[in-house]
Amino acid sequence: WVSSLLSGTAASVNAGCNLELSYGMRNNVFMHIPQALAMGNITLQMLRDRVRPLFYTRMRLGEFDPPAMNPYSTLDLSVVQSPEHRNLSLEAAVKSFVLLKNIQGTLPLQARDLPSQRVAVVGPFADNPKVLFGDYAPVPEPQYIYTPRRGLETLGTNVSFAAGCSKPRCQRYSRAEVVKAVGMADVVVVCLGTGVDVETESKDRRDLSLPGHQLELLQDAVQ
């Protein structure tokens, strides 16, 4: 424990710490390094010793090399979003799912049967691309995002849709639109969750319950 950011600076540098993750902080610890150096709490040689491995790593990563020496500089979206890479991403996504329960073998749904069925897709995650990406996700290209609704519609499925609530917090819930969407459906897909608006790094929750009216939405969708 230290009494101030200045004390924290000296303690951190003296202990061997050479990197601070302080994104979004206006007054982080290592901003006090010049003051700590001027007061003699740390030495210039110590700073050089701490900085050396940082720049060594950056040099090994090629950060200071001419662009022509970077083998990845010529890659564009035609390569990154090639069919081969997109198929690999799809395979990785499919293999990442965890099936907790499968009553009466309902899953998997057969794509060949879906065009003859009426499918309802409901919930705040059913057709909102912005909430499908977690913390530290890259900035996505909208044309490559397939929400549950969009994915089912590409199969020629007769899809009825209702978000129920526009955001994961689900503080305002439209029960009527959900009930209407599922009323004549043969299959109901309910898309619920949290997303970075509800929980993320430095934003913890007190419990694991569904946010807002999401549980009510689920109950209305499967009644």
Image (cartoon, rainbow, N blue to C red):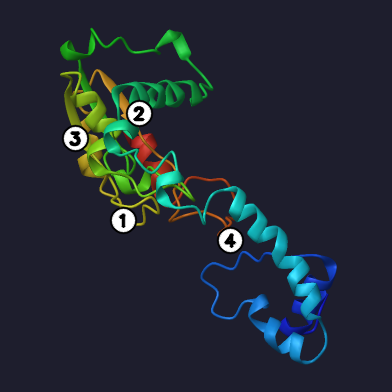
Marks 1 and 3, the one that precedes in the sequence: 1
Please provide percent x and percent y for residue 202: 58, 61
Taking depth in this image into account, of 186 and 96 the one nearest to the observer is 96
Q: Secondary structure at mark 2?
A: helix
Residue type indicated by callout 4: Ser
Residue type indicated by callout 3: Lys
The residue identified by callout 3 is 180
Q: Is residue 223 left or right of residue 24?
A: left
Category of crowding for the residue at label 4, using alpha-carbon neighbours closer than 10 angstroms: few (below 14), some (14–19), many (at least 20): few
The residue identified by callout 4 is 202
Taking depth in this image into account, of 116 and 34 the one nearest to the observer is 34
The residue identified by callout 1 is 172
Category of crowding for the residue at label 1, using alpha-carbon neighbours closer than 10 angstroms: few (below 14), some (14–19), many (at least 20): few
**Disc 4 to disc 3, how far (Cα)?**
38 Å
Category of crowding for the residue at label 2, using alpha-carbon neighbours closer than 10 angstroms: few (below 14), some (14–19), many (at least 20): few
Please provide percent x and percent y for residue 173: 30, 51
Give residue 20's mark.
none
**Disc 3 to disc 2, how far (Cα)?**
12 Å
Please provide percent x and percent y for residue 48: 74, 71
Q: Is residue 33 left or right of residue 141?
A: right
Q: Are marks 2 and 1 in contact (CB under 8 Å)?
A: no
Marks 4 and 3, the one that precedes in the sequence: 3
Marks 3 and 2, the one that precedes in the sequence: 3
Q: Quadrant of residue 144?
A: top left
Q: Is residue 8 left or right of residue 23?
A: right
Q: Quadrant of the N terminus?
A: bottom right
The residue identified by callout 2 is 222
Q: Quadrant of the C terminus?
A: top left
